[in-house]
């Protein structure tokens, strides 16, 4: 486990700091009302409300809003493992697969429990220097516990190259 992970989890659970993070880095998620409800080294729970700013013309939550919540549930886990890690590792979504089962007409809750997959991939990319991918699963349910959507978000991890913009030897 990344020794800085507990500090990241505290940041994500702090209501004001999390909202500020969303406002500055993910304004669409801020406006839509995405919230991290639970986060630990194994799983993340993220919600998206059904409201005017997140709905579609068919009186359900817009697929892009559902996608934001699903991505956040996987990305929060990955970011927890990467927070202030050395060497730094970049992360990028390279694929999104989704399937929809039921109209999302109230708050949707997305759960990703793939913490071990992220830990292993990040450890491997640091050990080998080679990029690794994780296909993380996030399942969205409504208040009644019915599955509304299932997402597979594929993340790529790669060790960031050392900054070589300045060399004292004139090389």
Image (tube, rainbow, N blue to C red):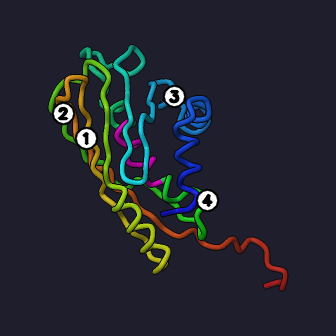
Marks 1, 3: nearer the viewer: 1
Q: CA distance from mark 1 to mark 3?
A: 21 Å
The range drawn in magenta is 69-78
Sequence-first tag of 3 and 4:
3
Q: Of 2 and 87, which appears nearest the observer?
A: 2
Magenta stretch: helix, strand or loop mostly: helix
Residue on which the image places disc 1 = 139
Q: CA distance from mark 2 to mark 1?
A: 7 Å
Sequence-first tag of 1 and 3:
3
Marks 3, 4: nearer the viewer: 4
Quarter location, residue 88: bottom right
From the viewer's perspective, is 120 left or right of 1? left
- Looking at the image, residue 70 lies above or below residue 52: below
Q: CA distance from mark 3 to mark 2?
A: 24 Å
> Which residue sits at x=42%, y=18%?
53
- Looking at the image, residue 154 lies above or below residue 163: above
Residue contact at pointers 2 and 1, CB within 8 angstroms: yes
Residue on which the image places disc 4 = 84
Q: CA distance from mark 4 to mark 2?
A: 35 Å
Q: Indicate the position of residue 35 as horizontal and vertical percent values.
A: 45, 31
Residue on which the image places disc 2 = 147
> Which residue sits at x=34%, y=19%?
50
């Amino acid at each position: 486990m990344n020794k800085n992970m507990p500090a990241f989890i505290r940041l994500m659970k702090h209501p004001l700091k999390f909202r500020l993070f969303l406002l500055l880095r993910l304004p669409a998620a801020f406006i839509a009302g995405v919230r991290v409800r639970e986060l630990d080294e194994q799983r993340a729970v993220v919600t998206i409300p059904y409201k005017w700013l997140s709905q579609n013309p068919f009186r359900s939550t817009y697929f892009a809003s559902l996608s934001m919540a699903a991505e956040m549930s996987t990305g929060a886990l990955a970011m927890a493992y990467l927070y202030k890690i050395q060497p730094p590792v970049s992360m990028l979504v390279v694929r999104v697969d989704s399937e929809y089962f039921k109209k999302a007409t109230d708050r949707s809750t997305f759960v990703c429990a793939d913490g071990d997959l992220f830990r292993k991939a990040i450890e491997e990319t640091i050990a080998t220097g080679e990029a690794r991918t994780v296909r993380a699963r996030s399942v969205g349910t409504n208040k009644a516990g019915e599955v509304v959507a299932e997402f597979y978000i594929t993340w790529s991890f790669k060790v960031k190259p050392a900054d070589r913009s300045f060399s004292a030897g004139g090389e």
